[in-house]
Image: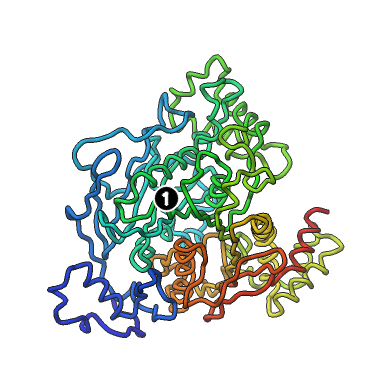
Amino acid sequence: MKPDANSAASMHDLPADAASLDRRDWIRQAVTILGGTAVGATGFASAAAPVATMATAIPTRVVTSDTAVVETSAGKIKGFDRNGVYIFRGIPYGDTTAGENRFLPPRKAQPWTGVRPSTGWGPVSPHADRASWRNDEEQFLYQWDDGFSGEDMLRINVWTPAVNDTVKRPVLVWIHGGAFTSGSSQELRAYDGGNLARRHDAVLVSMNHRLNVFGFLDLTEVGGEKYAKSGNVGMLDLVLALEWVRDNIGRFGGDPSNVTIFGQSGGGRKVSTLLAMPSAKGLFHKAAVFSGSHIRQNTTEVSRRLAAGVMAELGLTRTDLAKLHQIDMNQLLIAGIAGQRRVAQGAPAPAPNWGPVVDGNVLPQHAFDPAAPAMVATIPLLVGNTFAEFGGGMNDPVAHLLTMEQLQAKLQPTYKARTGELIAAYQKVFPQARPFEIAAVITGTTTYRINAVQQAELKSAQAAPVYMYWFNWRTPVLDGRPLPFHCQDLNFWFDNIDLAAQPTGGTDDARYLAAQMSGAFVAFARTGRPTHPGLPAWAPFTVAQRNTMMFENDRRSGQRADPDQQARDLLRSLQKA
C-alpha cells in the first residue's frame, strides 16, 4: 500500500540493521520512524506525537509460532502474532449452553489435552437479522461481520503485546452492543484490539455470551428452583468471563487487579447491570458506558410475560418444560422473536424486550438506586454519547436540505406549542447549526444524552469520580452528511481509524482525535483519570460543574461546563409533560 503523502519516512528509511533486530522490536522501531504513535515511559500514547501514517505505511506481518502458546485454566492454546501483537480468538471460557445446559447458569469450560488452536472466531449467540443491515449506507459505514451462530458460544478473545512475562498491564474488557438481543465480539471492525495493545501497552479482552431468548428467558414462575437464575443467565455468562480474566489474564501480560469493563449501546447497559451484580464484585475496578446509559432493567412482571409469550408460540405448558431443552436452536430463536412481538403488541413504549431482570437474586436492584451495592461507589466511571446517535443523515440523501419550516413541522407533533422555544434553545447552543443538525442533536439527546447525564449525576453523588464526554466529530464521507452516529466513536476509542476507513475517511484529523481518545481511555484504565499530555484538561463531572469533554474536528477538542444545560433541561421537561 502506498505511504501517505505526509509520511515522515518511507520503508526505505528503515534502519540498515533492521534484519538483525528481533521482529517485534523492528515493528516498534518502524512505528516510530514512520510517524506512528509510540508508547512512552508512561505506558500510553502521547497525542502530541505525529499520528498520521502508521497504519498505512507499515505492512501487515503475521506469524504463527510457538511463542504464541499460553496455558489457561482449561488447557494450552495457540494464537498468532500480527504486527507485534499476540492474538487469541475463540477460547472457550464456558461449556456449551445447548441441550440440558440451556437456561441454566454457565459452567466452566471442559478441559482439553494438547494445544488447542485459537486463531479463528468461535460461534456467536443465535440472533435475528437486523433490518438496518439491508440499508446500503449502513452497510457501507458499519461493515458488519455476523459470524456464525451456535450454542457453544461462550468464547473469549485476547489481544496483548506480550505473553508469559511479568509485566502487569491494564486489562480492557470489551462488552459488545446490540441491546440484549443481537451482536457479537467480532461484529464491527472497530472492536479489533490490536492498536490498543500495540500503541498503548494494554491487554484487550472481548467475548460472546447468550442473548435474547437464550440468555434471558425467565422460567422461574413455571420451572421453580432449577430455573431460579434463568432470567439472567446471559449476564452470568459475563460474570464467568470476568472470572476467566481473573484466573488467566496474568499469563497474557495483564493485571487481574486492574480490570476496566467497557461497552457501547447494549454493551453499556450490560456494564451498568454488572455494577449491580454481587457476583461480579471484585472482578473489575473501573467502568465505561458509551451511548448506553439505560439504567433500568426489566421487572419480573415483564420478564415472565415474555416467557409466557414464548411458551404460547411453541404451544407448551409448564408440564412440557423439558421440551424447551430439545427444540431446535433456530426454532427456539424464531419463537423468541414471535413471543416478544406478541407481548409488545399494545404495550406502552418502550415495548417489553429481552434483557436482565431485577429478580432479588442475581440482580437485587438497579445499579444506581439509592440501595445499590457498595461496590458501585468505588468504581470510577466514564460515560457519554455521540451528537446524533440515530438522528443523523444516514440513509437519507436529502436530509441536509431540511428547511426551518420543515423542522418546525417535524417536531410540532411531539413538542406542540413549545416547538419554537426548543429550536431556539438549541440554536443558542449551536448558532451555526443547520436545521437538520438541530433535529439530529434533539434526537441524540432524547435517546441517549439525557440518560447519560442522569447516570453521571447519580454517579457523582458517590465516592469514585465520573467523567463525561460528548462526541461531535464529523466524518467527511458521503459529503459529511452522516452526523456523529451511533457506534462512530468506537473507531476512535479503539484507535482503529484505518481499519474503519469507510466511516472515518481514514484522515489525519481522525487519527489525531483517535490518539487523543484512545490515550485518554487507556489512561483512565491505568489510573482512573482520563488525562494525558496530548489532551486538554479533563476534570470530573459534578452536579455543580458538569464538566464535559467535547471531542471535535480540527484539533478543537476541549472541556466545557455543561454546554447544553438550558436546552437539555427544557427538552427533559417536555419529555415529562
Q: Position of residue 169 (x, y in %)?
A: 36, 59
Residue 4 sits in quarter: bottom left
Residue positioned 20% across, 83% down in the render: 12
Is 229 rendered above or below residue 469?
A: above
Q: Position of residue 407 (x, y in %)?
A: 74, 68
Q: How is the image coloured?
A: rainbow
Asked whether, in this view, residue 566 is left or right of residue 340, the answer is right
Pick the residue in front: 423 or 173: 173
Asked whether, in this view, residue 423 is left or right of residue 286, the answer is right
Q: Residues within 10 Å of mark 1 (few under 14, many from 20)?
A: many
Q: Which residue is mark 1?
A: 185
Pick the residue in front: 147 or 407: 147
Q: Is residue 518 visible?
A: yes
Number of dots carrying numbers:
1
Q: Secondary structure at mark 1?
A: loop
Residue positioned 75% across, 73% down in the render: 404
Q: Position of residue 570 (x, y in %)?
A: 79, 63
Residue positioned 29% across, 78% down in the render: 2
Asked whether, in this view, residue 208 is left or right of residue 423, the answer is left
Is 268 rendered above or below residue 94?
A: below
Is 419 rendered above or below residue 372?
A: below
Pick the residue in front: 298 or 504: 298
**What residue type is disc 1 on?**
Ser
Q: Where does the N terminus fall, quadrant-wise?
A: bottom left
Q: Position of residue 195 (x, y in %)?
A: 36, 65
Residue positioned 50% across, 59% down in the render: 136
Q: Where does the C terminus fall, quadrant-wise?
A: bottom right
Q: Is residue 141 visible?
A: no
